[in-house]
Structures are given as C-alpha cells and as structure tokens.
C-alpha cells in the first residue's frame, strides 16, 4: 500500500521530450496486438497522429437535449467531417447509416441518468461490441467519487479484459463530480489511473498545466469539449490542447450546438490536423458560415 504520509507531487514530467523507443504513430501502442493497432489507426490519422471525434452520446443520460433531438437531422450532416463517431449502441443501430464508414467509439457503460446518481453503471456485453464492429469502447471513471470510484474502475478493468481478448481498444472517460477539482493534479491522477488500468485512450478536460497531464499519461489523450462556448473560444480551447500535447478532441455540444455545426466541425478538423492558428480556423468558420 502506498505511504500516504509521504505522497509527493510529481515534478519530473519531461515536458517537450518525445516518447522514447516508440515506432508506432500512436502513443503507447507499440506493444499492442495487430487488431488493436488497426482499430486505433482508424481513429487516429496516421499522418497527423490526431483525431477529431464527434461525441453525440449525451442522450444516454440526458435524453433529447439541445442538438441531439433528431440525430438524422442534426448529427448525420456532420459525420463525414469527423474521424470517429462516439455514440450509444441504440443510436448507432437506429440512426447512423452503416455506409457512413466511420470508426465507432461505442459508449459501453450505462445505468443511470441525470435524474439520479450518475455513474452507477454496468458494462455492455463484449459480444455486442463485436457484432457492431466498433473500433473502441468508452467507459466512464468517477475517480474521487467515494460512492462510484471502485465500481467504475472495476468496469474499466473488465472492459479492458474483454476488449483485449478480441483486439478492441478501450477509452477511459474521466468524470468530474461536484467535489472534484478541475485542475492538473486531479486530471493527471484520473488520466493516469485510466492508463494504469489498461485504457488505450483517455478522454479528459483541458485545464491549466495540461502539458503535465499529457506528459504523465502513457497513452493518447483527447479532450472533451464540455459546455457550449462561443465558436472562437472553442477553437482556442482546441488549439491550446493540441499545443500542449493532446492527440485530438472529442467534441459534442461545441459542434452540434454551434450556430453552424457543419462549418464548426470543419474548422475544428483543419485546426487539429493541419496546425492552423485560432485566427485561421475561425476565419474558415466565418467563410463557411456565410
């Protein structure tokens, strides 16, 4: 057991130093199976090493919230501009055309809604993920939540066990409760716990000191967009995250609640993959928004 009386905050992060002894284009994936590497390559562009994931799994806890009332009307027009789609199995089967030919990161845990206690979840059967031909499974971790921490870490552990049998990567998604600080120390802890328990991707939030969060996590981090921001602010969030080492973004509300979602996802895409500045990406958004 760790000696909690001598728990020292890390300070040797090697900021700016590339990962050593790595030949594959995805961080931490050198020793994975061929199947996992193949699926991760569908998600992360081999040229840029990055990904623009479109998250529209909000309905599994929120119901028909703004922007996802009709997936066929609001989300379907955005799919061609995303590198990966993150959704629940019900929406995947009912509303995502099979010929869209995009990798799927499947929301793989469920059990509660915003009306009750969040994260009291169970994980779907791995056979369903296989039948749906998904490229990754996403499981929430409530690190720091006294009621749900152990259960959600166990959920991730079991998902990794199942995924490893069939070459399916797992993305650990860090939850933020009311009492959890949105800072580098918390997100660094939560992200590292995801990776230590076998997650191949981590989804977390951007914060001050984010470069430490990325440096101390041995697998790719994609940022959550969070609440809706003005378009330029959302693009600046993406730019800062990529500049600090994120391997991509997994955005939802900042895309599908935009005044022009199709223009917004294209602006995010070029910013992430082509290293555009915030001003250049915002100019593209305005040009497409005319």
Image (cartoon, rainbow, N blue to C red):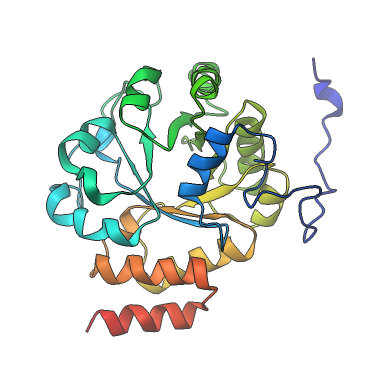
Q: Looking at the picture, does residue 163 appear above or below residue 29?
A: above
Q: Looking at the picture, does residue 98 appear above or below residue 269?
A: above
Please report the residue visible at 62 percent of the width from the left and 49 percent of the height from the top: 26
Nearest the viewer among 192 and 30 is 30
Write down the quadrant of residue 88 in the picture.
top left
Residue 121: in sight, yes or no?
A: no
Q: Quadrant of the N terminus?
A: top right
Q: Looking at the picture, does residue 227 appear above or below residue 126?
A: below
Q: Quadrant of the C terminus?
A: bottom left
Nearest the viewer among 140 and 99 is 99
Residue 66 lies, in percent from the top left, at 19, 51
**Horizontal relation, residue 196 to residue 223: left or right:** right
Question: In the current view of this chain or complex, which residue is farthest to the front?
Answer: 34
Residue 238 lies, in percent from the top left, at 49, 64
Residue 94 lies, in percent from the top left, at 15, 36
**Horizontal relation, residue 72 to residue 139: left or right:** left
**Horizontal relation, residue 120 to residue 171: left or right:** left
């Amino acid at each position: 057991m760790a000696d909690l009386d001598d728990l020292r905050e890390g300070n040797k992060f090697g900021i700016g130093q590339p990962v050593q002894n790595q030949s594959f284009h995805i961080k931490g994936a050198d020793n994975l199976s061929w199947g996992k590497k193949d699926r991760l390559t569908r998600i992360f562009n081999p040229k840029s090493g990055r990904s623009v994931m479109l998250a529209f799994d909000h309905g599994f806890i929120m119901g028909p919230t703004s922007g996802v009332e009709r997936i066929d009307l609001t989300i379907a027009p955005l799919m061609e501009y995303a590198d990966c789609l993150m959704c629940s199995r019900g929406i995947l089967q009912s509303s995502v055309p099979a010929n869209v030919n995009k990798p799927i990161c499947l929301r793989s845990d469920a059990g509660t809604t915003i009306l009750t206690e969040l994260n009291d979840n169970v994980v779907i059967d791995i056979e369903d993920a296989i039948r749906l031909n998904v490229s990754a499974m996403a499981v929430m971790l409530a690190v720091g939540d006294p009621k749900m921490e152990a259960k959600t870490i166990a959920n991730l552990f079991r998902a990794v066990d199942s995924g490893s049998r069939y070459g399916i990567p797992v993305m650990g998604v860090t939850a933020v409760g009311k009492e959890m600080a949105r800072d580098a120390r918390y997100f660094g802890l939560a992200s590292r716990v995801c990776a230590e328990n076998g997650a191949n991707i981590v989804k977390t939030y951007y914060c001050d000191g984010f470069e430490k969060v990325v440096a101390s996590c041995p697998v790719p981090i994609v940022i959550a967009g969070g609440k809706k921001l003005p378009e330029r602010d959302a693009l600046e969030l993406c730019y800062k995250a990529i500049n600090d080492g994120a391997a991509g973004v997994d955005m939802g509300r900042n895309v599908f609640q935009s005044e022009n979602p199709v223009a917004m996802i294209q602006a995010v895409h070029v910013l992430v993959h082509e290293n555009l500045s915030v001003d250049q990406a915002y100019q593209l958004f305005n040009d497409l928004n005319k």
